[in-house]
Image (cartoon, grey):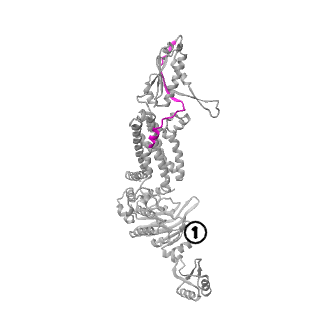
Amino acid sequence: MAAIEVDSLEKSYGSLKAVDGISFSVNEGEVFSLLGPNGAGKTTTIEVLEGLRDQDKGKVSVLGFDPWHNGYQLHEKIGVIPQGFKFLDYPTPKEAINYYATLFGVQVDANELLKRVILEDAANTWFQNLSGGQKQKLGMALSLVNDPKLVFLDEPTTGLDPQARRAVWEVIRKLKGEGRTVMLTTHYLEEAEELADKVAIMNHGHIVATGTVSEIENKYGSGQKLSVKGSMELVNHLKENTHLQVEWDVDGTVSIRLRDKDDAIVALGAIEESGADWRDLVVRRDSLEDIFLRLVGPEGKEAGEGK
Amino acid sequence: MPFSAKRLLADLKVYARGNLRSREGFFFTLIFPIILILLFGAIFSGGGSGPSTVYVQNQDAGVNVGPAHVNVGLQFIQALNMSYAESVNNTYPNHPIITPALDLHGVPAGDNFTQYLTSHSSSDGIVIPTDFSSAYIAGKSVNVTVYGNPASTTSAIVSGITREYVNAFNVFGAQGVHSVGVTSANAVSNSYKYIDFLVPGLIGFAALTSPMFALVNISSTYRRDKVFKLLSLTPLTKTEWLLSKILWYIGTTVVSFCLMSAVGIYVFGAHITFGWGLPIFLLLGPFFFVSLGMLVGTISNSPESAAVVGNLVTFPMMFLSGTFFPVSAMPMYLQNVAHVLPLFYLIDGLTNVMIYGNYTPALLDAGLILVLSIITFALAVRFFRWRED
């Protein structure tokens, strides 16, 4: 059964169409990542799914509920960390968890929950004195107080240092291991590659690609590439003496598209034959970032900070 | 979602803890009320500029002089009614502004005068005795009784004007004999001091400022920081959230009341009555101002504009509702403004209960604040949005 089903969802703010007829579904137990540059419509989509915003058109079902009209029933079954998670200044993580537990009417071992999100060391520190990473971890802990089947994480690692980011990833992996469904929005493509079972790339309110990371790479990628650091002279030699498709980047990277093994042998022979200086030979496939940039344009990389 | 006292109390606990942990919260809850009462208690009242309200009882039976029935008491009152005050006219310096000095209100001859004054929350009055006309005409000694509060500036004005008119009547009276005198009296056993009026005023001030400033700020910053969205994802309801704030500010108002009363009584010797009507006002004040603060913050777009609107609503109330100075000491047009400010009715009610022990007008004040509170609370809950901005 699908945990989330979205059909032709539309949402506008005045004349701005933030979400323009998107459809997708998320299966139970899946980590689904919504990618896109800032302003693509990710947060609006997530907030409609959480019941924080009403949709203009389309059909949305989350764990079988209409999120806007059955908010209270839905909220007992989901956990949420909103984008840029902030809380009251003075509760400690332990007090915040106990507060949430009373609100949800559940019994929770606050120490155990803090251990799960790797925050036990700061259990008695006021929220305002926690680091950015610790605050995000508290957000995660709070989103788990009601033992949710589905967790929404809206850019949970934005602004965190690499170490804190990896600690949050570890928690997300644990959630997946426990069989929970995770809806993750991020503009760190590496995060989606690491964690997501399925990915949807949004741009200007539309979904421009969806599937597993490898499905997207196969469908939208340009296959394998051989690249070396070299000069324009090398590029000219390859273009004049082979049938290969060759590109040159301003940073001195010469990229040669490989359709098959023979292309690789031809490319290596021609490079050697050119007599030009070259180094750093690498063979790689198009990454999700390459595809993302191709689909949403370079401004997406700037807005979304890239990898 | 059905109402849950458990959720309300959990929210109250978190909010209370936050306030006690924050230096600002601690200062405004416990220290600020003491500073206020010490500061203003040390300052004595200034002068008034509007006509002083005076209750007059003419017991004079009059006397028959030939075919005519003469009532000198009535003539004395009519003369008092023509008393006026002059003030400088800045626009036309040669034409001073003339305003009535006294605003006379008649009291039926058969009524108990001191009870009448108390029931009208006033200390200023004049009683003309039964034999006033006959004594005056015969040149016998007779006294007009002037009721007042020795500490009140309005009482001093009333007493001064009355003495002037008594002197004038003596000059024009029978053979210039100084037969009419003035006896001073107090309406109640305690004479009121400025501090007596200041304590209820400052309790009203505390009931206004803490919840208004806090709620205006919270309602806009919680929205900016998405804390409301976060709370909307829990079973906590808007009503429970707002009620928990009301409970907290009722608590802080009671604490302020205790601190201010203690300082008022033990430092300045204030005379305060702790009647059963007090809790009504200590509940209703925060109820109204929490709701009003929330409403003001809700209708503002940003924390900055909320602060501006909050100040526009709060400051006139702070200074024009009788907080620091009695409303009767203000010019008439400002007294009219005061009567449309909700804080006026809170302070008036507190004054009626704490000073005069006068419950009928206090209950009217309470009824008005209750109606306003219910309307404001309903509007605040209606317009304050957890979810979609």
Residue pushed farthest top?
A: B66
**Residue B62: within the magenta?**
yes
Q: Residues within 10 Å of mark 1 (few under 14, many from 20)?
A: few
Left or right: A173 as drawn, with respect to A257? left
Highlighted magenta segment, given as a residue range: B35-64
Chain under disc 1: A
Counting every numbered tag in the picture gives: 1
Q: Is residue A208 above or below residue B116?
A: below
Does residue B277 appear in the picture of this structure? no
Residue B279 covered by magenta stretch = no
* Any part of residue A234 in sight: yes
Location of residue A17 by image quarter:
bottom right
Give the amino acid type for the residue marked by disc 1 in the picture. Glu
- B184 or B323, nearer to the observer: B184
| Viewer-nearest residue: A143 or B237 | A143
The residue depicted at 54 percent of the width and 30 percent of the height is B51
The x and y percentages for residue B29 are 43, 47
As drawn, A64 above or below B20: below
Residue A276 % position (x, y): 59, 86
Residue B230's x, y, as percent? 45, 58
Quickly name the residue at label 1: A299
Camera-nearest residue between B103 and A215: B103
What's the residue at 44%, 40% (across, down)? Answer: B38
Where residue A135 sits: x, y (%)?
44, 62
SS of the residue under disc 1: helix
The image shows residue A209, relative to residue B54, as above or below, that is: below
Quadrant of residue A148 within the rendered picture: bottom left
Instruction: Identify the image quadrant of the N terminus of chain B.
Output: bottom left
The structure residue drawn at horizontal position 59% and vertical position 77%, both measured from the top left corner, is: A250
